[in-house]
Amino acid sequence: KHVKIDKTSVRFLIDGKRRIKMGIPPGQTTGRMGFYRKLPLGSGGKLSSLIVRIFGPQPGEPYVDVPRSSNAFFGGDAVQAYNDDGTYGGFGEMEHHDPALIAGKEPTSRVGVSVTHVLVGSDADIKAAGKTLLGVRV
């Protein structure tokens, strides 16, 4: 229920009801992620919000955020999403990572660039903008 995968996207439900975390390695992401939500407060379901994050994944570089069960130091995730079950207050998060710096190795510095769009408007307009920005149906 919380993770759905098809040919064009991975969809992750954030509902604060089940504790689950998922990650996607840099070679498996387009570098685009979004969080869509219908706004309940006073909008009668007619308004929605969308947060879109666009970043540049770098396959082959050291991503070091790996699952606790992994013995690997590299091969981690460029994208992660988390859904809390109330253990920490019932929330969710989405994040992206840039490659790590490894002490004593080159490079000794990196620059990460990302763009964040935060949109609020009619549900139809937000879904249309989401399709443009994410390349998939919202």
Image (spheres, rainbow, N blue to C red):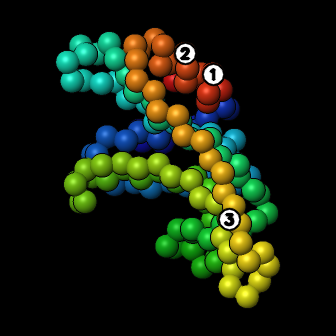
Graded by Cα atoms within 10 Å as few (under 14), some (14 to 19) or many (20 or more), the crowding at tag 3 reads many
Q: How far is the residue under mark 2 from the one under mark 1?
A: 6 Å
Considering only vertical position in the picture, is 42 above or below 109?
above
Kindly identify the residue that appears in the image at 59 percent across and 58 percent down. Answer: 97
Q: Amino acid at mark 3?
A: Pro
* Numbered label attached to residue 128: 2
Q: How far is the residue under mark 3 from the one under mark 2?
A: 32 Å
Q: Is label 3 in contact with label 1 (beta carbons under 8 Å)?
A: no
- Which quadrant would residue 131 be assigned to in this image? top right
| Nearer to us in this view, 67 or 34 | 34
Q: Is label 2 in contact with label 1 (beta carbons under 8 Å)?
A: yes
**Residue 19: x, y in percent?**
34, 54
**Residue 32: x, y in percent?**
62, 39
- Asked if residue 31 can be seen in this view, the reply is yes
* Numbered label attached to residue 132: 1
Q: Amino acid at mark 2?
A: Ala
| Nearer to us in this view, 129 or 80 | 129
What secondary structure is found at the residue carrying circle 3? loop
Question: Is residue 15 rendered to the left or right of residue 65?
Answer: left
**Residue 88: x, y in percent?**
25, 60
Graded by Cα atoms within 10 Å as few (under 14), some (14 to 19) or many (20 or more), the crowding at tag 2 reads some
Q: How far is the residue under mark 3 from the one under mark 1?
A: 27 Å
Question: Upstream in the sequence, badge 3 or badge 2?
Answer: 3
Kindly identify the residue that appears in the image at 79 percent across and 79 percent down. Answer: 106
Give the labeled residue for mark 3. Answer: 99
Kindly identify the residue that appears in the image at 48 percent across and 13 percent down. Answer: 125
Considering only vertical position in the picture, is 127 above or below 22?
above
